[in-house]
Amino acid sequence: MGKLKDMGFKIGDKVVCIKSHSDGYFNKGDEFVISGVYAGCCVPLVTIGLMLSPYELGSRCDCGKNFDYEGEAKYNANRFRKIEPTKKSNSVTKALVEKFKESERELVEYQPEEINIPVTR
């Protein structure tokens, strides 16, 4: 479990795949949210919301050992890296929020004048 702690994964973390799955379940660059963190026999394992098919009962570890389980598929955590929020993205978000607040203020303060349109029959 020490390896898991070193990786720093926890449920809810956004991660990016850095090594594609050999069966094509996910590819390098795909993004996921960690839904579970587990200690495998030789590597840390994570779940990312992908369910096993009804015909699959577990998976094989990198060392060759088979794991029997149902539900979400567990994958080698070393295939993923945490996506850290950047200062730039935070500043862009703050700027958008401020812009929205300003435009909302303008909408509330705007009082349209009465418009007289002649009615023709």
Image (tube, rainbow, N blue to C red):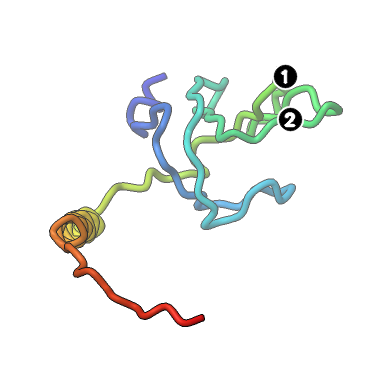
Residue marked by disc 2: 52
Residue contact between numbered discs 2 and 1, judged by CB atoms under 8 Å? yes
Q: Quadrant of residue 61?
A: top right
**Label 1 neighbour load within 10 Å: few <14, some 14-19, many 20+:** some
What type is the residue that disc 1 sits on? Glu
Q: Residue at x 83, y 26 (%)?
A: 54
Q: Residue at x 56, y 56 (%)?
A: 28
Q: Position of residue 83 (x, y in %)?
A: 36, 47
* Relative horizontal placement of residue 23, taking residue 80 as reference (left or right): right
Q: Nearer the viewer, residue 58 or 35?
A: 35
Q: Secondary structure at mark 2?
A: loop
Q: Residue at x 50, y 35 (%)?
A: 77
**Label 2 neighbour load within 10 Å: few <14, some 14-19, many 20+:** some
Looking at the picture, does residue 72 appear above or below residue 102?
above
What type is the residue that disc 2 sits on? Leu
Mark 2 / mark 1, whichever is N-terminal: 2
Q: Nearer the viewer, residue 53 or 63?
A: 53
Q: Nearer the viewer, residue 34 or 78?
A: 34
Q: Position of residue 42 (x, y in %)?
A: 54, 25
